[in-house]
Structure formats: C-alpha cells, structure tokens
Amino acid sequence: MSRRADVGRRPAARTLLVRCGWLAPPLGSLALTVLVTGGSVPVGARITLAALAVSFAAVTTAGLVRWSRTRYRLTAEAFTLHSGVFSRRRRTIPLHRIRNVDLTATPLHRLLGLSVVRAATTAADGEQGGITLDAVTVREAHRLKAALLAQADPRDVTGDPVLSRIDWRWLRYAPLTFWVFGGVGVAVGTAYRILDGIGVDPWRTALVRNLFAEFGHRALWLTVPAALAVVTALGSLGALAVYAENWWGYSAAWTDADTLTVRRGLLTTRSVALERSRLHGVLLREPLLLRAAGGASAAAVAGGLGDEEAAQARGVLLPPAPRAEALRVVAGALRAPSRLVDSVPLTPHPRAALRRRMSRGLLLAVLPATLVLLVLGALLTPVLLHAAWVYALVATAVTALLARDAYASLGHALHGSHLLIRSGTFSRDTLALDRSALVAWTFTTSPFGRRAGLVTLTAAVAAGAHGYHVRDVAADDAVALAAAARPGILEEFLEPDGPRL
C-alpha cells in the first residue's frame, strides 16, 4: 500500500464540474416552457425558474463544500471514508465484509473520465450497508475495485467463464414490456408536472388545444385507433432506446473464481461485481408478452445489494432475451446443470388454488366493472346495459384463461441444494434458491384459504426481496416442505405426533 493511500485521498477535483450538473433541470424546464408556449414565458414562470436556479446553485455550492471535506483511505485491512461539513462522519468497513463493488458513470462522469464507486457489505439496509465514493478517476476506480475484492478466497473456475454477451437481435424483445405504454405515460406526466410547477397550465397552451380540437373534429373510430397506434409507436421507439442505453456493451462473466461481474450501459455505464458466496439464487422472469414471444430475463438473488429496490436494479443478470439464453445464464450463475429450471419436475399445487384464482378474478375484475355499467345503463342509456353483458362474457372468458395459466405455473421442488419455486401469470417467475440461504419461514393463510386447505409459505432470505413466496400449498404438506427445505429451523416448533400447522 502506497504512502499516499495511508494519509488519505480526496475525490478527483473534476467532481466539482459534476456538481454543476444540478443546473440542468431549471435549464430544461425553461426550454420546455419556451417550446410549449411558443417563445412567450409568463412572468410567474420566470420567477419560478429564477427561484429554481438559485436553489440549484445553492445545492451545487453545498456540494463543493462537501467535496472539500471528503477524504478516503484504503489500507490492507479496511476502507475508510471521512465526510461531512458541520458534523464530521467517519465510516470504516473491514475488507473481509465487502461483498460487492459497483462502478457507475453517468454521461457527465464519462465525459470527465470519472466513476462512482459503491462498496456494499453483508448488510442489506441501503446506505448503512456500504460506502459510496463520488467520484474518482476511472483508473483509480478500477484500482479500488480490485483492492476491495482482494479478500476473496480462491476457488477453481469450471466451464466457460463468460455467461452471456449482448446480441442486438434481442432488441425485438424490447417492446414486449410495460414501458411501451407506461414509458409514454411517465414522459407525459413528467412534462405536465414540470410545466404545472413553473406556473404554466398545459391545457391552456395553444399547442395542446389545437391537438385536442383536431382530434375532436375527426371520426372517433379513426382517431382513437390512430392515437393508440401513435402511442404504441412512440412507446416502442422509447423501449428500444432504453434497451440500447441500458444494455450497450453488456457482458456477464466470472472474472475470477469468486466474482461474477455484469457490465452494461451506453450513456451511464454500470459494472456490478457479485461475490460467489453471496449469490444465493437466480430468478428467471417471463412476463406474459415476453413469454408469448419465447423470451425471458434473469436476475440474481444476492446479498449486499441494498434494499429491495436497489437489489432489483443492481441484480439484473440478463436483459429480455431468448429463453434458451436465459436458461444458460441461470445455469452458469448457479454453477448448475444447463437445464436445471426445465429438467426438474415441479410438484403441482391443489386444485383449490385454481378455484381461488378464478374467484379472485371474478370478484376483482369482472363483477365491479359489470355493476358499474349496469348502474350507468339504468340511469343513462340502454346501450351501456348491452355493454355490461358483453363485458361480463368477455371478461369471464379472459379471467378463466388467466386463472388456468396462473394455476399451471404454480409448482415447487427440492433438487439437490436448491429450492425451486414457480408462480405468476402476468409475470411467471421461477426461482432457484440455495437452501442454505434460508433463515426463516412464515406461514400465511386467510379464512378462505383455511377453508380451502391452502397455506402460503414465505422463505426469508438475507438477499434480494428478502422474502419469496411458495403460494397456495396444501396445508398438510406445508410444514413438511419447510422442514425438508432447511432442516433445523422448524423442528422445535413441531408437535410430537408429526408436522402440523
């Protein structure tokens, strides 16, 4: 370890320019206002923009002061970060507790040759579970990453260390996600909030009024499908752009015997390193549209990735891709047989689980809307009465199909060192979980579930979502399954005459 590291280092001076990026939102708001209003900016909007500029300037100044008071030190035993202005803070993490090191760079970071280093520990409570250093040079970031992960115990690497690389033919799966429509809604909602926040009413602008006037002057049977087509096209283009930005240069590989590294990103680059000892399972995800097209994605269930939201974002192993590729990544990450997820027969759940899904669909999706249409039809027009029975027939048929698909997806199995769990229809998820990672079980039921003889088991794991459900298991089999999956947890709570709830 160099003498310079012993006395502590300061983040790169170029970080000061990154802090100035806070000025982008008010400038973007001004540009959006000028575009919508045709160049005429109201006085109220000018005052709001000026206040935003002052606020962001103050935030930037505070960031510069924090930078001047930040030091980090890396020794052979620990990583220490000193920070704070009025209240000085010192955080020290022993190197043997560090489980994951991520390198992230936004477009501005990349332009300045900088990277953000996040070192996560065994804790899973967000910021308290690690240290974030923003920002250091790219060369320094890679040096820190190598040094922070140097405590890993060497193991033999078997098989191809490269799990997967980007194939741009996978772009065809990008539109088969929620973001085709959800992304357009988020963009429109964000623009509305920005304009409303600076005192501009979007509904009163000439641009919006002209669009709605033109829409209303045309036949609805033409304009409504045309609007849906435009939204679908815009959403698909957005989904393609997001996919390309997120997964540019993607690769997942065992960079050494103990570290699985996922690299990706075009504008914002990301490099997530997962320690083998903290990789407790892999989740195969198959959303409905993606599954219909033969696609799937994969995510890691790993400790040290932060809270549930952070773990979901940082634990992705594979973007939407062909299902065969997803199965290969799952097997490579688990060091398991190539067809683990498909080759092991799952134990089906009782038929009562099918009836439960059917009744839920009827009560939540079919009945409320049908009643609303009937009431409106009685009050307004008989046309809605006909719409009610048509909706009831169609919705009941769709509900039956979805309920059967959801029931067909239900299953579980114990195979070697793994517990396999499958459930879901809008997103069919198959989890291969290391049984040694189980720390507790929760048994959940309801009055209707007890009457049907069904119990939902929740496996507590110090990783990922922290709880994974085995839904609607037969009550007579629930305790036996939990006891067999991880012996030693339930035995002291079992009755002498056998396993029973």
Image: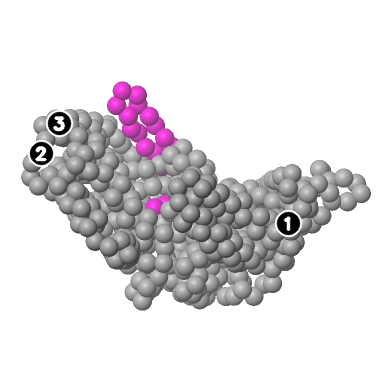
Q: What residue appears at the point 43 percent right and 54 percent down from the top-left corner?
A: 314
Structural distance between the alpha carbons of marks 2 and 1: 62 Å
Q: Is residue 326 above or below residue 262?
A: below
Residue 158 placement (x, y as % from top left): 54, 73
Disc assigned to residue 41: 2
The quarter of the picture where residue 400 lies is bottom right
Rounded to the nearest whole Å, what is the CA distance between mark 3 and mark 1?
60 Å
Total number of numbered labels?
3
Q: Residues within 10 Å of mark 3 (few under 14, many from 20)?
A: few
The residue to which callout 1 is attached is 473
Please state if 288 lies on the left or on the right of 471 as rendered: left
Q: Position of residue 335 (x, y in %)?
A: 57, 69
Q: At numbered mark 3, what does the secondary structure look like: helix, strand or loop?
A: helix
* Residue lying farthest to the top in this orientation: 86
Viewer-side residue, 10 vs 55? 55
Q: Is residue 315 above or below residue 62?
A: below
Identify residue for label 3. 44
Q: Is residue 413 visible to us here?
A: no
Q: Is residue 346 left or right of residue 121?
A: right
Q: Residue at x 44, y 71 (%)?
A: 321
Label 1 secondary element: strand
Give the mark, 3 or 1, whose residue is nearer the N terminus. Answer: 3
Q: Report the magenta residues as a range.
A: 77-102
At label 1, which amino acid type do we have? Answer: Val
Q: Amino acid at mark 3?
A: Gly
Amino acid type indicated by mark 2: Val
